[in-house]
Image (spheres, rainbow, N blue to C red):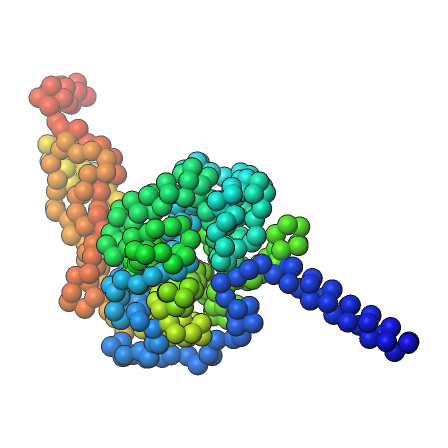
Amino acid sequence: MKILKIILALTLSVLLLCESVCAVTVSSECDISDVAVPIDSTVTDAAIGTQLDIKAKSAILMEVNTGKILYEMNADEQLPPASITKIMSLLLVMEAIDSGKMSVEDVISASEHACSMGGSQIWLEPGEAMTVDELLKAAVIASANDATVALGEQIAGSEEGFVAIMNAKAAELGMTNTTFKNATGLDAEGHISSAHDVAIMSAELIKHDLIKNYSTVWMDTLRDGESELVNTNKLVRFYEGTTGLKTGTTSGAGYCLSATAERDGLELVAVIMSGDTSQDRFNGAKKLLDYGFANYAYSDVAPELNDISEIQVKSGVQQKIKIQANDNFSILLKKSEVADVTQKVNLPQNVTAPIKQGDVLGTVDFYSGDKQIGSVDITAAENVNKMSFLTAFLWILHGLIQ
């Protein structure tokens, strides 16, 4: 009897422990055990032009600031995007916060529609209240469909209205292969995008620093610790410099990923569409990011005026005008070309009044070897009025009196 009691007690303890564990980890689009498995640690050090072994239907690597494509494979093929759809949803939320239309402290009451999403979710109940900050945690970290729709409804009044804004924003960004049918990425007829389009909206989203407060978090909680969130993007834990961004998995889309990372000022976005396995998408994104960091460099270079601070003015009330070149030149180059960057000041000997502050007077031209790769404007640092007859006469009269 004593042994039987011990067995029953142990069984009850195990059941309670299991119930507790299941209760704290919210529904995720990824198998949590898979997310916790490290990615392949082998570093891809392939030279530019090398064909990478990426197990997916399409892929792309883009530099965030310039939008330059560094590698692509079927990048314009239209495919279901799954939950990387949420990149556009989150971009609109970031813009709403920036414009003051929404605040992270705002409280949102979940609608019945938002709670009916299914799939990856935090099991919102109709009428349950959460802050925008909490819903962002759920949407970004755990890819929660219910949280995403709740945020969209707060902005547009309905998911349908929000989807219309999503499509308008896609058109504005030049995403020509994309049509959204919902805010979450659940499979729907005609809900399509492409690796290139996903890279475009990813680059736009990651420019909002606020998103990184969520997309770089490995684990967090909601409901006073009762709901545990585990990031569906394992690169956050296992890849140096990861800044985000979003996974996606459905039966129609396969395994998708938009991964962003930054090292030494070079910020990249790697997109994998329709991988066969979860591991394929993470390893594919890692190969793309490794390739980019191994071969490219990005920097902001300050223009040099070679100690030239002013130039002559013709027909002005003063003989010289101060000049400036305030903008840095942003350069994305192959690492082998960085040392070859030179500058050349391109200025006339004089300029003719009237001149307004900010008028472009010349340029600082940048070269990689013999090839010009860009320029920065040299502008007037002050106003110079044109010399009138009356002003000239008064100057002469003043000189005679003196």
Going 29% across and 44% down the picture, which residue do you hit?
168
Residue 84 lies in what quarter of the image? bottom left
Percent x, y of residue 197: 29, 58
Q: Give residue 44's quadrant in the image.
A: bottom left
Q: Position of residue 106 (x, y in %)?
A: 53, 38
Is any part of residue 326 visible from this angle?
no
Residue that protrudes farthest toward the right in the picture: 2
In the visual, does 24 lie left or right of 381? Answer: right
* Left or right: residue 12 compared with residue 240: right
Above or below for 36 versus 109? below
Location of residue 274 with respect to 353 vertically, above or below: below
The quadrant in which the C terminus is found is top left
Residue 226 visible in rendering: yes
Quadrant where the image shows the N terminus: bottom right
Rendered residue at 12%/40% (across/down): 351
Query: Left or right: 213 with respect to 396?
Result: right
Depth check: give the residue in front, 306 or 178. Answer: 178
Residue 195 x/y as whole percent? 31, 63
- Which quarter of the figure has residue 66? bottom left
Identified at 55% across, 68% down, the residue is 32
